[in-house]
């Protein structure tokens, strides 16, 4: 048998399976996975082939990282905070309530300690992870009645999961865990009073505006939620070096492209919702303050329980303080001026 | 002679030269070019080798796109608005005064019509261009005296170039064109009264804070300035398809990574400047309004002169209106709340 020429090793044929935690109907967030697959295929003339499966096709959405860690599939495209119950540090991979906005998330992951610290943690789980999508600040969700004070939240049954649910529970909300498809009927029947999902474009598809009038903002529990590409650590390490680089850059493209999709698709969807009778409402300062205090208390508890959590939390908090100092100058004053023009019809 | 195996074509040895318009001392903005080169090398096992040259090493900074169009070098990393005098449409490749912020720029280029429209135009210049860096909203610059009203701008000699200079000229400023290295002595001697450069991290290196006390914001003429990778159109088209994809994704990585660098390096630099006596000042609403009106007038003139300009301007303006409608909800209210916490020392 003749040895293959060395150069033939450059772009070997490899097929991977990637499980998304999202349905194909959400072209925005599911699209991040197909972006990764398409860019990797283009960069390798199709030799590195990533087959993308929607949630539930081969792995249920909420078991994505377990399947990757076990090697059942090589890759997943998911939000790591789904897995915060396994270890609370997973929350930072996506967003913690009152965390970083999308641009600050990128800065922390790419140039702060984010990627290093999170991959130290992911490695303990058999995973390698990279940012591969962002939604920006999500909406606070759909409410059947107006809520103005913390008292209005007492006993309110709201579809909201994870750490965000814990925060709202502390101020009186009764969090409900429902799959995406079960939200609409529950909201219609009044089994729940409120539900959060993503933002105008995705939410419109599920029709929540037909059964709940008030659309609140901001979704302070998801200010810059990162969607991750997760890879089985050993399989990633065994990839040819150039495939590792190609996969990293494909995730980087998917990261920016998903944010761009949301920023392009949300405005027309928002206008359509308002035209159909949706009433926009900001959460009151009182509600925001109470939730913020609740979140700070939870972070103190989790820091006491998990050294991983504490290490990442302290680092991200220091980064956030600086980021919000700096953002007050150019970014905020420029945007403020432009919004004044927008409101005055002068843009 | 035996034919090389077909697979040997996959990653052929190619060497390109890239001229940056920036000096090596600015690791932020110059770093975008080295990012592109490093990611391309990693993705091709070093077979696609892009040699990066600083401004002036082989091509003067302000001749970068001419050199690419002529094929003297294959690539450049530069800001397209340097070349707005050749054709005003070049301005949109970076930023027009009161244009899009960094995130909106990404949305317009990646998912709006930005990349398509700009490459229609770039093709007429023999170029293919992609976003490959962003600085975010820059600072408004260094002023020896406080300026509060439009009257304070009359006769003010300010180092500022391009379309931004035209806008400020309309409100009374006398724009001065000076290379980066000439700014400090001019400001020190009082030959000029003010100078804009980039932001805290880059500006600190040039020491402007030692000769001008007031640091104004926002740099409304550069809200989300894009740094471009430019490639000779014919040479890009002749690249193997996988190299085209690799180069595109490398630019995408550089785009996000540069913004992340600025967001990470600017906050500590800002704190250091303030500690050394720099006084931060926002431009007054009166000044912003007057400059905004001046800009709108200039855009009407340029639209009348150049059909290319009008086409891109109209498209970007429609995108901007929607973007600033949407940004007022979650993004702005979340950031506002977090800034209130930051100022209260509660972060």
Image: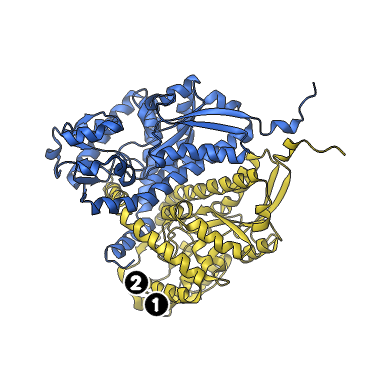
Chain colours: A yellow, B blue
Q: Which residue of the protein is positioned furthest toward the left in this rendering?
A: B151
Q: Which residue of the protein is positioned furthest toward the right in this rendering?
A: A1
Numbered label attached to residue A171: 1
Vertical position of residue B213 compared to residue A220: above or below: above
Quick one: SS at disc 2? Answer: helix
Residue ID at (64%, 66%): A63
> Whole-percent x and y of residue B95?
36, 37
Assess whether mark 1 and mark 2 are in contact (beta carbons under 8 angstroms).
Answer: yes
Q: Quadrant of the N terminus of chain B?
A: top right
> Whole-percent x and y of residue A102?
44, 54
Quick one: SS at disc 1? Answer: loop
Count neighbours of disc 1 (C-alpha within 10 A) and say few if under 14, some if 14 to 19, many if 20 or more: some
- Asked if residue A24 shows in the view, the reply is yes
Residue ID at (29%, 66%): B345
In the rendered image, residues at marks 2 and 1 fall on the same chain: yes
Q: Nearer the viewer, residue A344 or B55?
A: B55
Numbered label attached to residue A22: none
Vertical position of residue A245 compared to residue B114: above or below: below
Say which quarter of the image contains residue B79. top left
Q: Is residue A77 left or right of residue B325?
A: right
Residue ID at (30%, 50%): A339
- Asked if residue B113 shows in the view, the reply is no
Say which quarter of the image contains residue B321. top left
> Whole-percent x and y of residue A327?
33, 53
Q: Quadrant of the C terminus of chain B?
A: bottom left
Q: Which residue is mark 2?
A: A287
Vertical position of residue B342 compared to residue B281: above or below: below
Q: Is residue A168 left or right of residue A70?
A: left
> Whole-percent x and y of residue A343?
29, 50
Q: Nearer the viewer, residue B259 or A147?
A: B259
């Amino acid at each position: 048998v003749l040895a293959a020429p060395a150069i033939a090793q450059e772009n070997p044929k490899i097929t991977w399976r990637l499980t998304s935690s999202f349905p194909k109907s959400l072209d925005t967030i599911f699209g991040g996975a197909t972006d990764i697959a398409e860019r990797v295929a283009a960069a390798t003339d199709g030799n590195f082939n990533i087959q993308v499966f929607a949630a539930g096709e081969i792995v249920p959405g909420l078991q994505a990282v377990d399947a990757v860690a076990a090697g059942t599939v090589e890759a997943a495209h998911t939000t790591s905070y789904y897995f915060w119950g396994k270890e609370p540090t997973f929350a930072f991979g996506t967003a913690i309530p009152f965390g970083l906005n999308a641009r600050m998330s990128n800065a922390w992951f790419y140039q702060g300690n984010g990627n290093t610290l999170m991959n130290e943690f992911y490695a303990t789980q058999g995973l390698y992870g990279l940012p591969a999508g962002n939604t920006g600040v999500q909406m606070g969700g759909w409410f059947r009645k107006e809520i103005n004070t913390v008292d209005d939240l007492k006993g309110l049954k709201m579809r909201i999961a994870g750490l965000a649910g814990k925060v709202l529970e502390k101020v009186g909300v009764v969090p409900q865990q429902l799959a995406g498809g079960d939200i609409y009927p529950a909201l219609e029947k009044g089994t729940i009073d409120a539900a959060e999902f993503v933002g105008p474009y995705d939410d419109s598809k599920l029709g929540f505006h037909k059964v709940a009038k008030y659309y609140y903002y901001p979704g302070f529990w998801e200010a810059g939620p990162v969607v991750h590409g997760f890879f089985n650590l050993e399989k990633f390490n065994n990839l040819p070096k150039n495939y590792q680089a190609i996969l990293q850059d494909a995730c980087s493209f998917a990261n920016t492209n998903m944010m761009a999709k949301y920023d392009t698709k949300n405005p027309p969807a928002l206008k359509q919702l308002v035209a159909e009778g949706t009433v926009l409402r900001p959460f009151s300062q009182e509600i925001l303050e109470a939730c913020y205090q609740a979140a700070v208390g939870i972070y103190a508890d989790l820091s006491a329980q998990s050294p991983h959590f504490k290490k990442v939390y302290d680092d991200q908090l220091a980064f956030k303080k600086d980021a919000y100092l700096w953002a007050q100058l150019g970014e905020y004053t420029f945007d403020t001026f432009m919004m004044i023009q927008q409101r005055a019809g002068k843009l």
